[in-house]
Image (cartoon, rainbow, N blue to C red):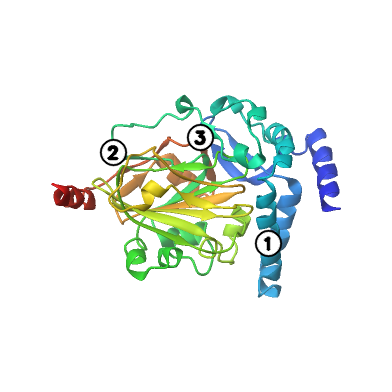
Amino acid sequence: MFGWIHTVLNWILFNLKLIPNHQVGWKSLNRKTGQLEREQEPLMKKLKLIALFNPLTEWIDATHAMRLYLHRRNVQKGQEEGTPASHNQIKGFIDYYHINMKDFEPSDPEKYRTFEDFFIRRHKPSSRPIYEKDDPSKAIVCADSRVVTYDSVPQAKKLWIKGSDFSITNLVMDVNLGAKFDDGAVASFRLSPQDYHRYHSPVTGTIKEFRSLPGNYYQVDPIALRSRVNILTSNARDYVLIDTQEFGEVLFVAIGATNVGTVYIHEKYRKPGTQISKGDELGMFQFGGSSIIVAFEKDRIRFDDDLRECSAACIQVSVEMGMSLGRATGTSSASYAAVVKGDAA
């Protein structure tokens, strides 16, 4: 019933040009075009989010029963996307979201056996150039996504991430590690289902720690993130700690969300001492929307001005992997990478 209503509403609004290209989501500045636009999103999804994440329903649904029910539905949906029958969804999905398949390989939709295979499609190497690739003092965007950046966690909580329980300590479930970043700068990347869902290292350095934390798969839409529901500290997530000469320690947290079957850090980057360069593929999400938090120690990064200005106005910036994120503002006296090299000598 809901699916039929959704189809009819979308057809009416699209053909009457009341909502061009299904742009009913949160405001974003497209960094490539400089145009302010709204994210493409199914109208029924938007209505469900408004109904679920508002002060009244958050107060009534104290046990989060409805969101847990949707979580179970989403896990089932993710499993279905791995079946051969799901291949039939690919063409319609590409048309709905106007995905440029020339950026991917294979570019032919018929080459993907299942929707899950299509979802974790790879970029063509030339489609996402790495900004200042040989300069490790310049951090890059880690995923095709919409990003907001803040100079501190308190600023992020005030303007964007409203969950009552959000802190870096609660995000990583480690008091000592969290304390290193609670006063630091934060970049929050949000991936929608239509995005490329592999993610890459924003910096060059050495893996110092890896951890996987189980959890739920709540929505990470701005409506959900700006509610009092603890989304980011409840969802399943993996993280790595990357030690760098230029930025000090950098925390990379990949967070699952609606319809994500797996949050996956590649095995080679789960081992302390492994070297990684900015732009290297760190891992991937399986089907669904998802989120990434990258945290820097205090006073170690200056985010790009356009990102900072839009974020202060609660406007996301639509970015592509490899674009500039910010520059280092200081160097450490001794890095973990240097210690590892010294021990190996």
Q: Can residue 312 be seen in the rendering of this structure?
A: no
Which circle's residue, 2 or 1, is located before the other in the chain? 1
Q: CA distance from mark 3 to mark 2?
A: 22 Å
At 39% from the left and 43% from the top, the residue drawn is 201
Which circle's residue, 3 or 1, is located before the other in the chain? 3
Q: CA distance from mark 2 to mark 1?
A: 42 Å
- Where residue 97 sits, quadrant-wise, is top right
What amino acid is at disc 2? Answer: Pro
At 42% from the left and 56% from the top, the residue drawn is 239
Q: Within 10 Å of the Cα at label 2, are there few (<14), some (14-19), or many (20+) other Cα atoms?
A: many
Question: Which labelled disc corresponds to residue 249?
Answer: none
Residue 299 point in image, percent of width and height: 29, 53
What amino acid is at disc 1? Answer: Arg
Kind of element beneath mark 1: helix
Q: Is residue 41 above or below residue 214?
A: above
Q: Which residue is mark 1?
A: 72
Q: Which residue is mark 3?
A: 31
Q: Which residue is mark 2?
A: 136
Kind of element beneath mark 3: loop
User: Closest to the observer: 8 or 32?
Assistant: 8
